[in-house]
Image (tube, helix red, strand yellow):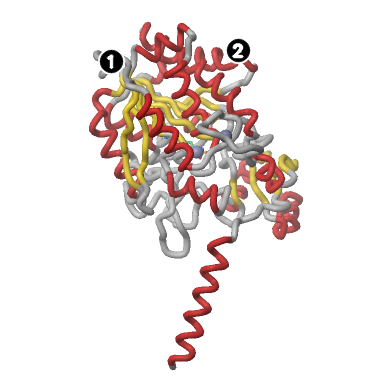
């Protein structure tokens, strides 16, 4: 290669980089179909499709269990062929994903968080830092670091000494696109600090708390800057970027319901804790593991309260207590807005999913209270839940959390 061609290809690379740098993925005319397989064969056909260019917003569960699949406009016709040939029921649930994304945008500028819209990582971090600076019960904690070099920030809240062995840990936004989860966490944190409701105060002040709103900051930033529908980390692997951070934990790693292929949305990574974020967070949790009374993880969507484990449907450890309290918590949750949640073991109500954070915590430290929530909704908006649902979702979720902590103290 002579100097001129080297120089021109250098220029070319530069401009390609330039183009990619400011381009944001658009979802114009992407549709979310709700497909219900009516036979075991149809279930298997759908599983085949799962790693074939379609983004499954919910995973295949079984016969008569609906699955939400996002279909790009240029796949529409072949997707309609699939529907026609297979034993499915199909309906278009979201006619244009980009329209929902456009509606999700903030209408006005704001100071701090007010939960009338979703916020960027910087806004969330500024708010956490400000809380720690202005509130003597709040301490800023760095629980980890990401591949791209970001801090993973959270806060510790403690109202008095003696609560150490009743520590509650709240995780959210391990999946980047599940924005409602961090919005709920920051709202609950604010209530724990400021609510005058006597039940909330009692629960707040009789526990120590860790709140980590964004477990996957690199992915979360990417959903704001580039691709609203990103799920995984941003660690590069051959051909594709990112591992599923909720398949990457070192407990029954790659033991069903995760993929060894880097391009899959449920890629478990080349080995357990391959992702700097999960590895560093796990090291932090290990320093407080023996003190944990509760570990709560927030995801979206589907309105479920999930109990360990994700690798087996066996009812292990304190399954019965978790189930009974979970049912009571779901009924507290329903009181305010009549939002219905289903409670049960991950495998039984959802699907096999190994290597998740909650499973690692439960399996490693024997933490008594362990729930993974799939928050609102049931698919009308899916991951793009309108911001006017943030506060109602958070309110009802806190109602259920108060019930969980009160009921476990009675056992
Ligand atoms: O598949 C997941 O990781 C979660 N569902 S989601 O649609 N938000 O991706 C379920 C997590 C179940 N939890 C564990 N396996 N620990
Ligand atoms: Zn705002
Ligand atoms: Zn999730």
Q: For the residues labelled 2 and 1, say whether their Cβ atoms are less than 8 Å apart.
A: no
- Dot 1 corresponds to which residue? 163
Picture coordinates of residue 32, whole percent (x, y): 68, 45
Question: For residue 26, what is the image quadrant?
Answer: bottom right
Tell me the tag on residue 335: 2
Instruction: Determine the residue positioned at 34% across, 40% down.
Output: 252
Residue 309 visible = no
Q: Which callout, 2 or 1, points at the residue further toward the start of the chain? A: 1
Picture coordinates of residue 182, whole percent (x, y): 49, 34
Query: In whole angstroms, how far apart are the C-alphas of marks 2 and 1?
Result: 29 Å
Q: Is residue 150 left or right of residue 200?
A: left
Instruction: Determine the residue positioned at 57% across, 22% down.
Output: 341
Question: For residue 304, what is the image quadrant?
Answer: top right
Residue 141 visible = yes
Describe the element under mark 1 as helix, strand or loop. Answer: loop
Ligand 1 within 8 Å of disc 1? The answer is: no
Ligand 1 within 8 Å of disc 2? The answer is: no
For the C terminus, which image quadrant?
Answer: top left
Residue in the foreground of this view, choosing between 294 and 7: 7
For the N terminus, which image quadrant?
Answer: bottom left
Q: Is residue 284 left or right of residue 153?
A: left
The local crowd at label 2, few if under 14, some if 14 to 19, many if 20 or more residues have their Cα within 10 Å, is few
Establish if 63 lies above or below 271.
above
Q: Nearer the viewer, mark 2 or mark 1?
A: 1
Tell me the tag on residue 398: none
Describe the element under mark 2 as helix, strand or loop. Answer: helix
Instruction: Determine the residue positioned at 25% across, 14% down.
Output: 161
Q: Residue furthest bottom?
A: 2
């Amino acid at each position: 290669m002579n100097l001129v061609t080297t120089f021109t290809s250098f220029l070319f690379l530069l401009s390609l980089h330039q183009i990619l740098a400011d381009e944001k993925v658009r979802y114009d005319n992407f549709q979310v179909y709700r497909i219900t397989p009516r036979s075991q064969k149809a279930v298997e056909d759908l599983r085949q499709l799962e790693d074939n260019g379609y983004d499954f917003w919910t995973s295949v569960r079984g016969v008569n269990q609906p699955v939400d699949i996002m279909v790009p406009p240029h796949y529409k016709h072949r997707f309609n062929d699939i529907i026609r040939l297979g034993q499915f029921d199909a309906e278009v649930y979201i006619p244009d994903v980009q329209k929902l994304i456009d509606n999700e945008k903030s209408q006005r500028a704001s100071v701090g968080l007010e939960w009338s819209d979703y916020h960027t990582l910087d806004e969330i971090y500024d708010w956490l830092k400000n809380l720690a600076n202005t509130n003597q019960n709040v301490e800023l904690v760095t629980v980890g670091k990401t591949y791209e070099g970001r801090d993973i920030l959270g806060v510790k809240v403690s109202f008095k000494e003696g609560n150490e062995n009743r520590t509650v840990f709240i995780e959210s936004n391990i999946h980047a696109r599940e924005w409602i989860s961090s919005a709920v966490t920051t709202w609950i944190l604010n209530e724990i600090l400021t609510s005058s409701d006597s039940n909330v105060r009692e629960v707040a002040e009789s526990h120590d708390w860790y709140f980590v709103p964004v477990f996957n900051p690199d992915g979360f930033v990417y959903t704001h800057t580039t691709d609203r529908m990103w799920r995984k980390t941003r660690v590069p692997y051959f051909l594709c970027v990112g591992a599923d951070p909720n398949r990457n934990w070192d407990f029954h790693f790659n033991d069903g319901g995760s993929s060894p292929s880097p391009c899959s949305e449920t890629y478990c990574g080349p080995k357990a804790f391959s992702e700097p974020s999960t590895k560093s967070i796990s090291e932090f949790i290990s320093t407080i593991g023996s003190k944990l009374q509760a570990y709560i993880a927030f995801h979206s969507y589907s309105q479920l309260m999930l109990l360990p484990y994700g690798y087996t449907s066996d009812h292990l450890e304190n399954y019965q207590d978790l189930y009974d309290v979970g049912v009571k918590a779901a009924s507290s949750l329903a009181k305010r807005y009549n939002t219905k949640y289903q409670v049960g073991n991950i495998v039984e109500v959802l699907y096999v999913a190994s290597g998740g954070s909650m499973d690692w915590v439960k399996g490693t430290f024997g933490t008594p209270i362990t729930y993974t929530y799939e928050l609102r909704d049931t698919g009308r908006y899916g991951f793009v839940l309108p911001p006017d649902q943030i506060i109602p979702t958070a309110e009802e979720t806190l109602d259920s959390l108060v019930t969980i902590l009160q009921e476990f103290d009675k056992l």
